[in-house]
Amino acid sequence: MPHIVVKLWPGKSEQQKQELADALSQDVVRILGSSEGSVSVGIEEVSSDDWRDQVYGPEIDAKQAMLYKKPGYSM
C-alpha cells in the first residue's frame, strides 16, 4: 500500500516514466509515511483515440467526487 497507476498518452521515454515513478514514490513515502518497499507505481499508455472511452469517461467524469486534482484546474 499504496499502488499508483498513471495513465498517459504514448510518447514518453522510459527514462521519463522511471523518473515520474521515482518522484511519485518518494512523495508517497514523504507525505504518507509509507515505507519505500510498500509503494508500487504502474504506468499505462492509452492512445489519444481511446482516451475518452478508457480514461476520461470511466475514471475522471464518472468519479468526479474522488478527484483531488481535476483536469483544467490549476493547483
Image (tube, rainbow, N blue to C red):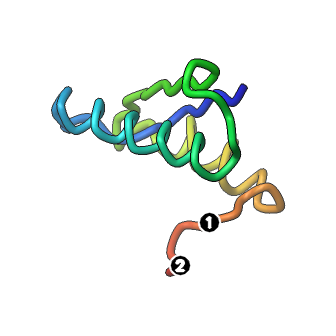
Q: Which numbered marker is on residue 10?
A: none
In the rendered image, which residue does mark 2 sit on?
A: 75
Residue 47 placement: quadrant: top left
Q: Are marks 1 and 2 in contact (CB under 8 Å)?
A: yes
The image quadrant where one finds the N terminus is: top right
In the rendered image, which residue does mark 1 sit on?
A: 69
Instruction: State whether residue 5 is above or below residue 70.
Output: above
**Front position in the image: 9 or 31:** 31
Please name the amino acid that badge 1 sits on: Lys
Secondary structure of residue under mark 2:
loop
State the residue at coordinates (67%, 44%).
59
**Front position in the image: 9 or 52:** 9
| Percent coordinates x, y for residue 41 in the rendering | 50, 27
| Percent coordinates x, y for residue 56 in the rendering | 58, 50
How far apart are labels 1 and 2 at the CA level? 7 Å
Return the residue found at the far right: 65
Please name the amino acid that badge 2 sits on: Met
Secondary structure of residue under mark 1:
loop
* Left or right of residue 36: residue 9: left
**Front position in the image: 47 or 74:** 74
**Front position in the image: 14 or 59:** 14
* Left or right of residue 5: residue 31: right
| Percent coordinates x, y for residue 13 in the rendering | 16, 33
State the residue at coordinates (70%, 57%).
61
Instruction: State whether residue 37 is above or below residue 14.
Output: above
State the residue at coordinates (38%, 35%).
22
State the residue at coordinates (43%, 28%).
43
